[in-house]
């Protein structure tokens, strides 16, 4: 179980700080998405959060306040020096005593004007990734590798190299296809299928009753300007060219409501599946996905942010524990131990064996 949150060390929830809450709920990881800078219109008009800490600095601070929670963040080697990325990841793994993780992405890059990219005539003289890191081997062998590719090439890469896969499926049937495709790539790469964990993204809105959960959804939906919500659909729709209160085209989604409802729900879930309900209905849904082999677990997104995280920890986690679907205590100290994914063999050991 992973949670994706904007985290601020000074924020407190009663006697339990926001940093400590995921650990008390026995989450596997905190996941922090990150990316290169965007133009000013994107940042000010379309991002759900404008100010965000740099992830390595933030997670290094969080590592000193936690003992078990894994710390996984996104960084692209298209927008950052590979040698620096490797050194930061290794350093975080040491600082956290074996809880670091990397969500591997590549971008068209350079996606940031802050990165100096060598000119074409300089490239032959630059050996970025061939220099020593000047940091000893990470505690976990190397940090846990996460990936989210859904192209044929991305799924083959993830099956061969990743420990965690983040997926954005909207139905159990789609989840099963993704799940079994990734597991087959894992076996084809000579790995055991349970050495790769599939985590499905889900945005959860909880209520004591279904009506309360729907009310919370409407409250957070109203925070999104409708023109931004329509833009976030990513389908080329433009305000003024569509009737917002007309049914959403069945070619896209037979179960969707109006354009307005679909756009709002897409934004609230940040493009991921929305799960709105009570303790029982939410737990039933998550259990159904696991039992159908549509996922190994979930990356939980909280549209209500702090309150949503607290409600998930206080209501959903205990019910999953009662059903035997989630741990009551951490299995080990490192993230690999808690995920039960194997430690990679040292690269130079493999070279001596002729296997690298």
Image (tube, rainbow, N blue to C red):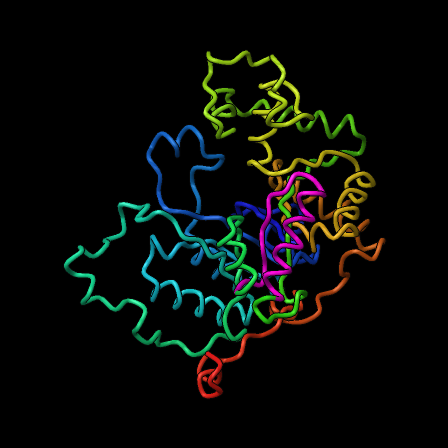
Is 181 magenta? The answer is yes
Residue 65 locus on image (x, y percent) = 56, 61
**What secondary structure is the magenta-colored segment mainly?**
helix
Is 177 magenta? The answer is yes
Look at 55% across and 30% down and name the residue there.
267
Look at 59% across and 66% down and name the residue there.
188
Q: Quadrant of residue 273?
A: top right
Q: Nearer the viewer, residue 13 or 159?
A: 159
Q: Quadrant of residue 51?
A: top left
Q: Quadrant of residue 169?
A: top right
Residue 330 locus on image (x, y percent) = 71, 66
Q: Quadrant location of the N terminus?
A: bottom right
- Classify residue 11 as left or right of residue 121: right
Q: Give the answer, above or below, for where 356 lies relative to 288.
A: below
Look at 63% across and 25% down and name the residue there.
219
Q: Residue furthest bottom?
A: 352
Q: Residue furthest right?
A: 322
Look at 70% across and 54% down and name the residue there.
25
Residue 262 locus on image (x, y percent) = 60, 24
Q: Which residues are magenta?
A: 161-187
Q: Is residue 307 visible?
A: no
Residue 153 locus on image (x, y percent) = 48, 54
- Classify residue 218 as left or right of residue 325: left
Q: Give the answer, above or below, for where 343 lies relative to 73.
A: below
Q: Give the answer, above or below, for where 347 lies relative to 164.
A: below
Q: Nearer the viewer, residue 217 or 103?
A: 103
């Amino acid at each position: 179980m992973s949670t994706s949150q904007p985290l601020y060390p000074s924020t407190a929830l009663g006697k339990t700080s926001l940093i400590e809450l995921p650990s008390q709920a026995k989450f596997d990881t905190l996941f922090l998405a990150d990316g290169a800078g965007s133009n000013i219109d994107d940042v000010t008009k379309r991002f759900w959060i404008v100010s965000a800490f740099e992830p390595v600095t933030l997670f290094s601070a969080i590592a000193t306040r936690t003992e078990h929670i894994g710390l996984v963040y996104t960084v692209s080697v298209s927008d950052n020096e590979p040698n620096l990325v490797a050194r930061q990841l290794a350093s975080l793994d040491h600082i956290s005593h074996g809880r670091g993780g990397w969500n591997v992405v590549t971008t068209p890059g350079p996606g940031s004007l802050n990165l100096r990219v060598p000119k074409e005539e300089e490239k032959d003289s630059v050996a970025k990734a061939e220099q020593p890191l000047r940091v000893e081997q990470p505690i976990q062998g190397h940090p846990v590798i996460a990936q989210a590719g859904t192209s044929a090439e991305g799924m083959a890469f993830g099956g061969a190299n990743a420990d965690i896969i983040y997926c954005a499926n909207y139905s159990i049937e789609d989840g099963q296809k993704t799940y079994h495709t990734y597991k087959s790539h894992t076996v084809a790469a000579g790995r055991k299928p349970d050495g790769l964990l599939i985590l499905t993204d889900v945005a959860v809105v909880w209520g004591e009753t279904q009506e309360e959960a729907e009310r919370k959804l409407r409250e957070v939906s109203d925070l999104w300007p409708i023109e931004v919500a329509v833009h976030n659909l990513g389908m080329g729709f433009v305000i003024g060219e569509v009737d917002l209160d007309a049914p959403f085209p069945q070619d896209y989604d037979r179960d969707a409501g109006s354009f307005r409802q679909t756009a709002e729900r897409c934004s609230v879930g940040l493009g991921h599946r929305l799960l709105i309900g009570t303790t029982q209905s939410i737990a039933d849904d998550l259990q159904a996905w696991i039992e159908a082999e549509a996922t190994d677990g979930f990356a939980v997104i909280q549209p209500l942010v702090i309150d949503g995280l607290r409600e998930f920890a206080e209501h959903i986690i205990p019910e999953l524990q009662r059903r035997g679907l989630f741990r009551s205590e951490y299995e080990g100290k490192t993230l690999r131990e808690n995920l039960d994914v194997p430690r990679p063999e040292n690269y130079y050991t493999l070279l001596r064996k002729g296997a690298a």
